[in-house]
Image (cartoon, rainbow, N blue to C red):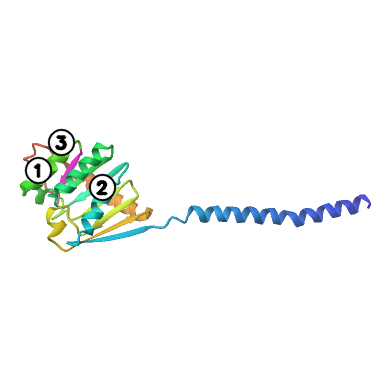
Amino acid sequence: MNLSKRLLTMALAGMMTAPLVSAHAETTAAATTETTSTVMPTIRVGFSPEGTASALVLDVINNAKRSLRMLSYVMTSPDIVNALIAAKQRGVNILVVADYNVNQSREKSQECLKALLRAGIPVRVTNAYRSLHDKVIIADKNTVQTGSFNYAYSAFSMNSENVVVITDAPSVTASFMDLWRSRWYGATDYSVDDNTTVERHL
């Protein structure tokens, strides 16, 4: 075989094998992409007075590893307060925003908020709205708990309530984090000796 024929044969061989290598690489890349995007959001629901709502709320708090961000209308549940304090003691960073009016008008609520403060958990309150009626916990910037469930004793066994817990849904978590930040930065620090009136923002 002369030189020209050998060059033609080598060129044809290269044209035949190159796409095979490329196709293999593309298949591998596609498989890798598919593998990394297979984490699907999970949604759990619970109800009161059946007991599954309170179980979910406590599960979110008890399984937090790094952070908890909370919006609370009313806070009178010793179980939730104790779970938050236990989370703080194991190193979880916790910040709480609560409605001023409803909590300031209830002695039990004041006791609960001050117990959080004494445990080193920063608490802010607001009356910028008729009610801060949110019931939200964001755990580790990956799990969102929301629903009608108040963080109150009555929500555990006396009321009809619902809880939704969403995990591994980044866009949902980001939206709730934006909500939490707006309420946190619009609120006022609560004090253990708090007996002042928070100015209403109109």
Residue visible at 24% across and 53% down in the picture: 57
**Of residues 186 and 79, the one drawn nearer to the viewer in this rendering:** 79
Instruction: Give the residue at mark 2.
Output: 61
Q: Amino acid at mark 1?
A: Glu
Q: Residue at x 11, y 45 (%)?
A: 199
- Left or right, 36 with reference to 118: right
Query: How far apart are labels 1 and 3 at the CA level?
Result: 10 Å
Give residue 105's position: percent from left, percent from top.
5, 49
Would residue 107 appear left or right of 159 to someone viewing this image? Answer: left
Q: Position of residue 19 (x, y in %)?
A: 70, 56
Tag 3 residue:
118
Q: Secondary structure at mark 3?
A: helix
Query: Which residue does the image show at 28% across and 49% down from the upper left?
Result: 138
Whether residue 190 is situated above or below residue 76 in the rendered picture = above
Q: Are marks 1 and 3 in contact (CB under 8 Å)?
A: no
Residues marked 1 and 2 touching at CB (< 8 Å): no
Is 111 colored magenta in this rendering?
no
Say what amino acid the circle numbered 3 marks.
Answer: Arg
Q: Say if the magenta span includes residue 124.
A: yes
First reached walking from the N terminus: tag 1 or tag 3: 1
Residue range highlighted in magenta: 121-125
Label 1 or label 2, whichever lies nearer to me, is: 2
Dot label at residue 111: 1
- Quarter of the image where one finds residue 184: top left
Judge depth for marks 3 and 2 and give the one in front: 2
